[in-house]
Amino acid sequence: MPRALIIQHGHNGPAGLVADRLEHHGYQLHTWLVSAAGNGKSPAATDFELVVPLGSAQSVYDVAAVGSWIDRELDVLRAAHDNSIPVFGICFGAQALCVALGGVVERSPQYEAGWVEVDTDDESVVPSGPWFTWHGDRCVLPAGATELARNEVSVQAFRHGNSAAVQFHPEVTPDIVRDWIAELDAAWFAHKGIDSDAMIDGFANHRDTARVNLHRMLDRFLDDTAR
């Protein structure tokens, strides 16, 4: 049975629908809560057939917030990539992969949260959406990376060798997003100009399509790189 390392950054940031789909394909999942791991031994990337770093409320470059654990995560991502073990990064995980491979993460000119469509080079690789997104940073891709999708705010998907990443959140469920919303007060959403009710209401219109799109995208990734 193939093993997948899920790199999780908080108790309310699980792999959700991505975990479900990986289990459907026979993966045994091992979750590493890196932000709570202290200085303990990091998992060996070579013990796994796939690595999936997830989202985080932190920024890769925010040393005060992530300095205690980000280097350990970047080392695991580099080791995976260097040993041809596919990485599938999601949001913060995409940004961590970008940095691990020599790119840069910077503050995005516009905070992006809610349901979006993306401009994709190939619908069979990265469907155009709708996708749920929530981020304030963006990737400046390293040499050798290929941009797969984008919008006016940021790179939305890229590939580097047999690793790939998306800026949006294909893993989310309504309960996951409700947990994220509950972490913040109404003033935060008002300041950002974000309608938290619309985030949840969007699942009524987009949940089925987003699930199908996730299956298409992840299945294609696994077929192309991880099997």
Image (tube, helix red, strand yellow):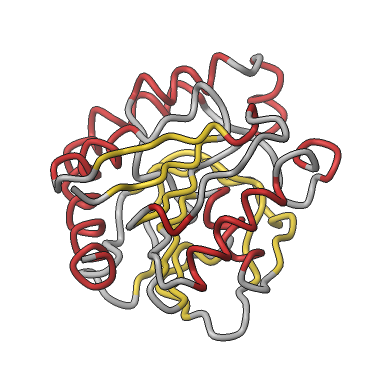
25 or 138: nearer the viewer: 25
Residue at screen point 74% across, 55% down? 107
Residue at screen point 69% across, 23% down? 188
Q: How many marks?
A: 0
Q: Is residue 13 above or below residue 137?
A: above
Q: Is residue 62 left or right of residue 112?
A: right
Q: Is residue 195 above or below residue 160?
A: above
187 or 31: nearer the viewer: 31
Residue at screen point 49% across, 69% down? 81
Q: Quadrant of the C terminus?
A: bottom left
76 or 161: nearer the viewer: 76
Residue 216, image x, y percentages = 18, 57
User: Which residue is at the far bottom?
Assistant: 144
Q: Is residue 171 above or below residue 1?
A: above
Residue 41, image x, y percentages = 62, 40
Q: Is residue 142 above or below residue 18?
A: below
Q: Is residue 182 left or right of residue 218?
A: right
Residue 159, image x, y percentages = 43, 73
User: Which residue is at the far right?
Assistant: 64
Residue 51, image x, y percentages = 42, 53
| Rendered image quadrant of residue 35 | top right
